[in-house]
Image (cartoon, rainbow, N blue to C red):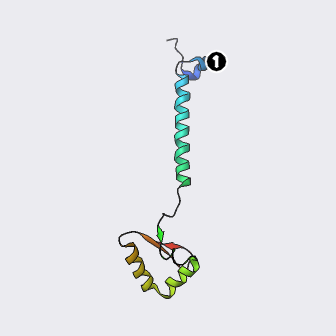
Amino acid sequence: MSAKLPFQLSTGAVYKHPQFPSLIAAGVVAFTSILLVALKFWSSSATPKVKILLQDEIKSARQRALEYCFNPRAVMAKGYAKFKNEVFGLDTQDGKTRD
């Protein structure tokens, strides 16, 4: 019953304890995992990467939005014909791209 718990050992004895290196390794792995998950979460963009309708024909996002505003049926028909079963976006008057 002379065995002491880790919190009862002196600082020097803790470093010499056989489980200390594995505790350090587990801490490093846990910290690295949390860091990688956080970086992945923050680096992912909020908007999906989709093709924008009329982007190859009209370079200005404002002009694309105006084209959709004044001629929505033709723009949508062109989008459905061009992208068929794909997801595509289009620029709108509120300054956001709609999917």
Residue pictured at 42% horizontal, 77% vertical: 79
Does residue 21 sit above or below 57 in this rendering? above
User: What kind of residue is marked 1?
Assistant: Gly
Q: Which residue is mark 1?
A: 12
Question: Residue 14 is drawn in which quadrant?
Answer: top right
Residue pictured at 52% horizontal, 25% vertical: 22
Residue 32, given in percent of the width and then of the height, sits at 55, 39
Depth order, front residue of 8/48? 48
Question: Residue 80 is drawn in which quadrant?
Answer: bottom left
- View extreme (top): residue: 2
Query: Judging from the image, what secondary structure is the residue with disc 1 in?
Result: helix
Depth order, front residue of 93/38? 93
Quadrant of the image containing the C terminus:
bottom left
Q: Residues within 10 Å of mark 1 (few under 14, many from 20)?
A: few
Does residue 76 sit above or below 52 in this rendering? below
- View extreme (right): residue: 11
Side of 79 where 15 appears, left or right: right
- View extreme (bottom): residue: 70
Exactly how many numbered labels are in the figure? 1
Depth order, front residue of 93/49? 49
Residue 45, given in percent of the width and then of the height, sits at 53, 59
Residue pictured at 47% horizontal, 69% vertical: 51
Does residue 82 sit above or below 29 in this rendering? below
Residue 38, given in percent of the width and then of the height, sits at 55, 48
- View extreme (front): residue: 57
Residue 93, given in percent of the width and then of the height, sits at 55, 80
